[in-house]
Amino acid sequence: MDIILEGIRQAFILLVTFDPEVLGITWFSLKVSGTATLISLFFGMSVGTVVALTQFPGRKFVVSLINTGMALPPVVVGLFVTIFLWRNGPLGFLEILYTPAAMIIAQAVIATPIVMGISLAAMQQLPRKLRLQILALGATRLQMVRILIREARLPLLAAVMAGFGGVISEVGASIMVGGNIKGYTRVLTTATVMETSRGNFDIAIALGIILLLFAYLINLVLTYVQQRERPR
Amino acid sequence: MKRSFAASILFMLLVCLLAFTTTAVAQPAQKNVILATTTSTQDSGLLDVLLPIFEKKTGYFVKTIAVGSGQAMAMGAKGEADVLLVHSPAAEKKFMADGNGVERRLVMHNDYIILGPPADPAKIKGMKKASEAFKKIAASGSIFMSRGDNSGTHAKEKDIWKAAGVKYEGEKWYQQTGLGMGQTLAVAAEKKTYVLADRGTYLALKKRLGLDILVEGDGILLNIYHVIEVNPKKWPKANFAGAKAFGDFMVSKETQDIIKTFGVDKFGSPLFFPDAGKKEEALGQ
């Protein structure tokens, strides 16, 4: 039990003394996961919206695939991204294995189906009549989609939070494609794994607390945006 | 109000893309050396001391991938690493015989120890021969916790079982974690089982474990580290110049002097013993 208290104390010390290594790792974690989430928003929301608003044969099958993708294990993603990015692999010419770019790719692959699945559900739960009404009022299709997205803002921001939460807390893929290289591809989760295996449980706990703290701050901001009074 | 939501998303996107592009171009590719190594060199903190010196001296950027020796050699054999720092001699000899490496140079050694709960149910404390101790563990049916991950430590453990002539695979008392040394030690400590560990990791974790050293000093328990450059003839994309520079650095006098005293201040005894230029057969005499 006292080891947890020691961890909390360590986290506090590391934060108030602006420990350069911990700050660097924290900032880098936010950068990688933030970028990956933004990429996943682009693909996830657009595909999710299109699938939600259209009818085509095999649609149920596509939706089931997207929903399964929400459960993609990060290590499996990490393994496949690694194999593709190997020097002698199909995308080896890019030479980005063990770089931040590889981590962003892996995390974006993990977050995209999460964002896609939730966006899909969010757009689909809007009443069908709303669409007809908007079109009847003379809106173009693009304007209709924009209005619908605004209507579904609450669950869509939940999609952002779920996607970001999924990748900032993920360790399997990051350690495989990033390599946990000091000062280069080390993020909070991979550093926690390493400190644990080094037996520095207090520092590992401290890093975990810092991770939770920043995840909380980001979600706090997003929640404020989400719960804001809707303009009339 | 409506527009500010879209605008803030766009702003975040721009900031992140900017941040992303600056990180991505920070390192020129040809300056990278991929070092595949065992977890013990990283977990002990030795590489944290040595790598900054190497990088400052040569200008190379070392990407350390800390995995088990088995995986490190698999990476080398596929040309996915430039240089290896590993401790699994039998597998290394096969690696060299297959033409995967250029040169295999002795760097340092420490030793393995057999640990167990202070109660020592198999009564092996103080035994001189590791294989005899393993026999007694097997005969008593006390649980033995194995790494089971094809690491150098796992390979050594299998050697000792072989020397003991005991059937262990599939036995009820033989359990495998499939994890690194630190985590396996934690499991062994929690379940009060016997375990084979390298002394460096044990010393680093000792205070939380409650496991005692029961057998040490047998010749078979030597833990020898070699540095191997991956063969550029087989894998043209391997950075041989960088690998060679790293190999030379590891056996240089300056590095060997650092290895000699590394860990003394923290653990009271060195974690590794420098051996550059010595013969493998001469160790432990």
Image: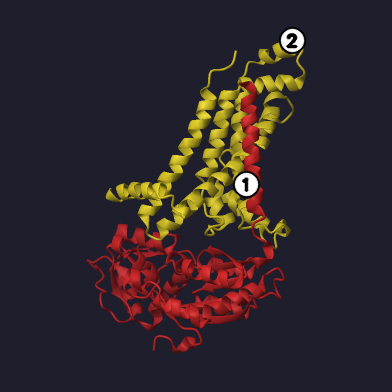
Chain colours: A yellow, B red
Q: In which quarter of the image is residue B157?
A: bottom left
Q: Residue B19 carries which label?
A: 1
The N terminus of chain B, quarter of image: top right
Which residue corresponds to mark 2? A137
Which residue is most to the left? B119
Please state which amino acid type lies under the numbered disc 1: Ala
What residue is at 31 percent from the left and 57 percent from the top?
Answer: B190
What residue is at 34 percent from the left and 61 percent from the top?
Answer: B188
- Badge 1: chain ID: B
Q: Quadrant of residue A66?
A: top right
What residue is at 72 percent from the left and 19 percent from the top?
Answer: A144
Compared with B213, A216 (above or below) is above
What is the total number of numbered labels drawn onto the structure image? 2
Does the CB distance between marks 1 and 2 fall below 8 Å?
no
Q: Which of label 1 and label 2 is nearer to you?
A: 1
Give the left or right position of residue A184, taking residue B283 as reference.
right
Q: In which quarter of the image is residue A121?
A: top right
Packing grade of label 1 (10 A; few <14, some 14-19, many >=20) is some
